[in-house]
Image (spheres, grey):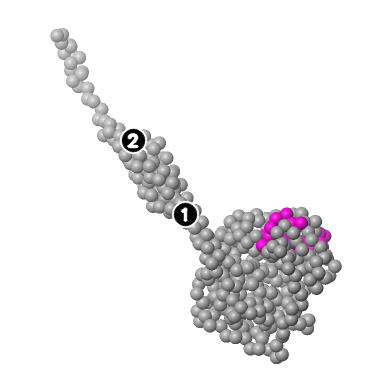
């Protein structure tokens, strides 16, 4: 064997091998990355069971731990983190959806979310007025398939009509119960209301409770415009917000849709962030009183807004949880609110001062009850306003704004 020259041997011996980084020589095991990826897939797949939140949190943590070690392939870990986070967010979304449907199921079975306490738990009877009004049947008409009813000046001639939606037909009756005309409807409605427009005449809003939209119908039965309701519609009402003689619309949405005010042609005027807007009402503008918009929500409060959507107050008189609610202008032009909590109905003003309370049908306070739980009007023709609602015994009760 030939020896290398002495000088060459010395140079080779003098050369030192550069130290090698242990982490580059031995890249981190991919077990953490693989675990993160698998947990991310599981988190996304099980997010509807809400387990995805916990699994996703662990998967994301393992992926981050792998990336912090550096030196190895990162694709699996990055995908694991992304899928894990998607699983976390999907679980949060499903939790919100389940909470929303919990309220729907509660309302469907007439469950009041908060039991009444104090005076609301045992509301007093109202004192009887003298003399008491007597009920007399004026007329009765059978309309097969009737699902919704309202009254309004449908012909714009100064005379009120009774409008009944039955399937795909709108029946128009006069105040003696005689059917004057019928109109084809484009869809089935479980709630209708007649509104005013100086240019277009009377219009009809129609919707199905928890449906996807509210529609406005003209005199030919055609849809003038519609507004989508996202997670479901809780109610819609006409009312003159600016005092110009034309009705605007308020729409209350389920879930996180909130409360919206729309112009007469369907353009958005303003919105308010509320959860589960159970009931809504408009007290129309008058010569010496601005319009007032009211809505109950998932907190059980009666929320008050001015015509521009600025919040004025949030009321819970007597600590009640209020779902059913309406409001109107009294003979003195002040506003009185009528709201239902448990088996009680409470009348109060814009500041929350209670005028009176009495028993009411417990279903009227439920989130599943019809949106109109009481009506105000001049029943005697003397200029004074009265309320009509169903009391705790199941009877129709007529009460003055003073509580008689």
Q: Which mark identifies residue 71?
A: 2
- Of circles 1 and 2, the one toward us is 1
Residue 339's image quarter?
Answer: bottom right
The reply to whether discs 1 and 2 touch (Cβ–Cβ < 8 Å) is no
Q: Which residue is mark 1?
A: 92
Residue 80: x %, y % from top left = 40, 42
Residue 302: x %, y % from top left = 59, 71
Please name the residue shown 30% across and 34% down the image. 27
Q: Is residue 238 visible?
A: no
Q: Is residue 138 visible?
A: yes
Mark 1: few/some/many CA within 10 Å (<14, 14-19, 20+): some
Q: Is 220 on the left or on the right of 118, as rendered?
A: right
Residue 367 belongs to magenta span: no
Helix, strand or loop status at disc 1: helix
Residue 232's image quarter?
Answer: bottom right
Please name the residue shown 18% across and 16% down the image. 9
**Closer to the N terminus: mark 1 or mark 2?**
2
Quarter of the image with the C terminus in it: bottom right
For residue 262, above or below residue 305: above
Residue 179's image quarter?
Answer: bottom right
Please name the residue shown 33% across and 41% down the image. 32
In depth, the one of 27 and 204 nearer the eye is 204
Quarter of the image with the N terminus in it: top left
Residue 200 belongs to magenta span: yes
Range of residues picked out in magenta: 184-207
């Amino acid at each position: 064997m030939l020896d290398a020259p002495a000088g060459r041997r010395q140079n080779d011996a003098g050369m030192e091998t550069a130290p090698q980084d242990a982490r580059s020589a031995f890249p981190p095991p991919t077990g953490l990355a693989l675990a993160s990826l698998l947990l991310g897939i599981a988190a996304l797949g099980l997010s509807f069971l809400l387990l995805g939140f916990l699994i996703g949190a662990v998967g994301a943590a393992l992926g981050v731990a792998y990336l912090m070690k550096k030196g190895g392939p990162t694709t699996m870990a990055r995908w694991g983190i992304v899928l894990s986070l998607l699983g976390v967010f999907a679980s949060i979304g499903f939790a919100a959806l389940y909470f929303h449907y919990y309220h729907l199921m509660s309302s469907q079975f007439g469950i009041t979310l908060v039991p009444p306490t104090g005076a609301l738990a045992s509301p007093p009877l109202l004192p009887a007025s003298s003399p008491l009004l007597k009920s007399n049947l004026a007329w009765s008409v059978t309309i097969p398939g009737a699902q919704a009813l309202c009254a309004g000046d449908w012909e714009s001639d100064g005379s009120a009509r009774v409008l009944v939606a039955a399937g795909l037909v709108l029946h128009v009756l006069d105040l003696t119960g005689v059917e004057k005309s019928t109109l084809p409807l484009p869809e089935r409605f479980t709630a209708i209301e007649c509104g005013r427009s100086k240019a277009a005449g009377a219009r009809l809003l129609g919707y199905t409770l928890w449906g996807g939209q509210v529609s406005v119908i003209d005199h030919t039965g055609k849809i003038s415009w519609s507004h989508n309701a996202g997670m479901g519609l809780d109610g819609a009402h006409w009312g003159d917000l600016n005092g110009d003689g034309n009705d605007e619309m308020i729409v209350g949405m389920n879930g996180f849709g909130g409360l919206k005010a729309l112009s007469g042609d369907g353009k958005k005027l303003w919105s308010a962030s509320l959860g589960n807007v159970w009931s809504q009402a408009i007290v129309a503008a008058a010569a010496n009183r601005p319009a007032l918009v009211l809505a109950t929500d998932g907190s059980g409060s009666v929320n008050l807004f001015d015509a521009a959507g600025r919040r004025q107050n949030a009321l819970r008189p007597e600590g009640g949880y209020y779902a059913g609610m309406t409001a109107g202008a009294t003979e003195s032009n002040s506003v009185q609110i009528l709201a239902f909590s448990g088996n009680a109905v409470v009348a109060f003003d814009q500041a929350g001062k209670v005028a009176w309370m009495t028993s009411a049908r417990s279903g009227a306070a439920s989130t599943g009850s019809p949106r109109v739980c009481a009506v105000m009007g001049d029943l005697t023709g003397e200029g004074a306003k009265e309320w009509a609602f169903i009391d705790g015994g199941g009877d129709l009760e007529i009460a003055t704004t003073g509580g008689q």
